[in-house]
Image (cartoon, rainbow, N blue to C red):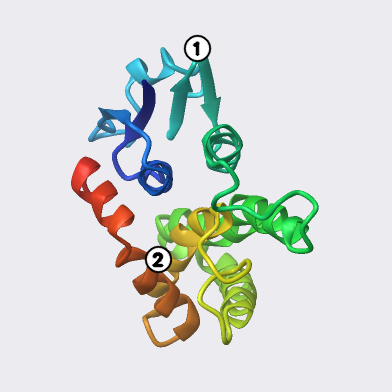
Amino acid sequence: MIEVHHLNASRSRRITWMLEELGLPYDVVTYQRDPVTNLAPPSLKAIHPLGKAPVLRDRGKVFIESGAIIDYLLRQYGAGRFMPAPDAVEYDRYVELLHYAEGSAMLPLLLKLYVGRLGEAGAPLHPRIEGEIQNHLGWLDSELAGRDYFVGSGLTGADVQLSFVAQIAARFAGREAFPNLTAFADRIEARPAYQRAMARSGA
């Protein structure tokens, strides 16, 4: 049985959603952050030394990193679904976006979150951070102009990986700032598999 090790207030939703789209059985093992430090409990480190979520365990192997987990699930269980064929024209774009979500897009969003906790001490960094957020979210919004998904005409693992970026864009910038990203977030949240993932392991 596939296990998803899920930490509250983390990005594990993408993995449970991907599993629901694939129609695979899985168990969710939930961990709660320490209310004082906001860190993961030591028990999560027993699964992987970094103590980060999501973690996936399957067939005696342990996987970290959302992009790598999605790639593994689609290669093992996708049967050609949710990704272009390796010789397809759009395959390189798919791989690029699968890694871009965490490799580049999330950095300014995380900096906004952490630097915001510094109060006035972080003020000098705000213009650069906001500029980078506008740069990345603006590009993603333009990439969705006239299309429902980022790669091809249907949902792929790249869309699943980018979903958190789209969802947080509306939270940080407002629903009107990046209308294509907002519409994308609404579209994916309405999918039955996404709704099942929400019902299974919470918001």
The residues bearing labels 1 and 2 have C-alpha atoms spaced at a distance of 33 Å
Residue 203 in sight from this viewpoint: no
Question: x, y percentage for residue 44?
Answer: 37, 21
Q: Nearer the viewer, residue 83 or 80?
A: 80
Q: Nearer the viewer, residue 184 or 53?
A: 184
- The disc at residue 167 is 2
Determine whether 115 is above or below 11 in the image.
below
Q: Nearer the viewer, mark 1 or mark 2?
A: 1
Q: Residue at x 50, y 76 (%)?
A: 148
**In this orientation, which residue lies closer to the viewer: 181 or 50?**
181
- Residue at 62 percent of width and 82 percent of height: 142
Q: Position of residue 58 (x, y in %)?
A: 47, 21
Q: Identify the residue shown where x is 59% and y is 56%.
A: 101
In this rendering, is residue 73 above or below 47?
below
Report whether 99 appears left or right of 198: right
Could you classify mark 1 by the number of other residues whose Cα lies within 10 Å: few (under 14), some (14-19), or many (20 or more)?
few
Name which residue type carries label 1. Answer: Gly
Which residue is under mark 1?
Answer: 60
Three-letter amino acid code of the residue under disc 2: Gln
Could you tell me which secondary element the residue under label 2 belongs to?
helix
Image coordinates for residue 91, horizontal then vertical, percent: 73, 56
Q: Nearer the viewer, residue 49 or 94?
A: 94
Image quadrant in which you'd find residue 54: top left
Viewer can see residue 187 = yes
